């Protein structure tokens, strides 16, 4: 399955090629070019282990972090709700996600980092496998 991006529509129903990137929506097509998941996400990543991470709107100031991320299956069904402010792809049935905290900018040429919150390792059902703050 491939990711597609579609711009907002003009009055005539055609994609508006001059629309700002924030107004593009992403969805998925199959190998035949048929839309499988309607364009509805500001960002939609590739499928890994049968799930893709998606988010409904773009983050201001820092691409790819903030807002809320969740995971859909290949039919487009939301299987892990939009509740994480950062998420990674699934590999071997597990993915890292971050919840809570505040995005902190530490310098002009340095990437931002999370101040507070917690990193979690989740399985394909959204169950927490490892919690950064858990003590065993």
Image (cartoon, rainbow, N blue to C red):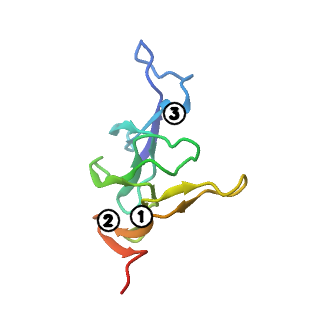
Mark 2 lies on residue: 124
Q: CA distance from mark 2 to mark 1?
A: 8 Å
Residue at x-position 46% and y-position 50%: 45
Q: Say which of 107 and 2 sits in front.
A: 107
Task: Compare marks 3 and 2 and give the one earlier in the sequence.
Answer: 3
Q: Position of residue 50 (x, y in %)?
A: 35, 59
Classed neighbour count for the residue bearing mark 2: other residues with Cα under 10 Å, few (<14), some (14–19), many (≥20):
some
Tag in front: 3 or 2: 3
| Visible residue check, residue 2 | yes
Mark 3 lies on residue: 22
Residue at the outermost bottom position = 136
| Left or right for 60, reference 130 | right
Residue at the outermost right position = 109
Classed neighbour count for the residue bearing mark 1: other residues with Cα under 10 Å, few (<14), some (14–19), many (≥20):
many
Q: Position of residue 13 (x, y in %)?
A: 40, 17
Mark linked to residue 129: none
Task: Compare marks 1 and 3 and give the one earlier in the sequence.
Answer: 3
Circle 3/circle 2 CB separation < 8 Å: no
In the image, residue 30 above or below residue 123: above
Label 2's element? loop
Mark 1 lies on residue: 90
Q: Quadrant of the C terminus?
A: bottom left
Circle 2/circle 1 CB separation < 8 Å: yes
- The quarter holding residue 56 reads top left
Label 1's element? loop
């Amino acid at each position: 399955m491939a990711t597609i991006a579609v711009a907002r529509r003009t009055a005539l129903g055609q994609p508006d090629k001059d629309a700002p990137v924030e107004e593009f929506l992403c969805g998925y097509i199959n190998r035949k070019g048929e839309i499988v998941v309607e364009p509805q996400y500001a960002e939609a990543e590739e499928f890994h282990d049968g799930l893709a991470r998606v988010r409904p709107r773009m983050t201001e100031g820092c691409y790819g972090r903030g807002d809320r991320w969740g995971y859909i299956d290949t039919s487009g069904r939301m299987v892990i709700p939009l509740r994480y402010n950062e998420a990674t792809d699934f590999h071997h049935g597990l993915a890292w996600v971050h919840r809570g905290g505040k995005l902190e900018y530490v310098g002009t040429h340095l990437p931002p980092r999370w101040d507070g919150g917690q990193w979690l390792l989740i399985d394909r059902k959204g169950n927490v496998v490892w919690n950064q703050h858990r003590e065993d």
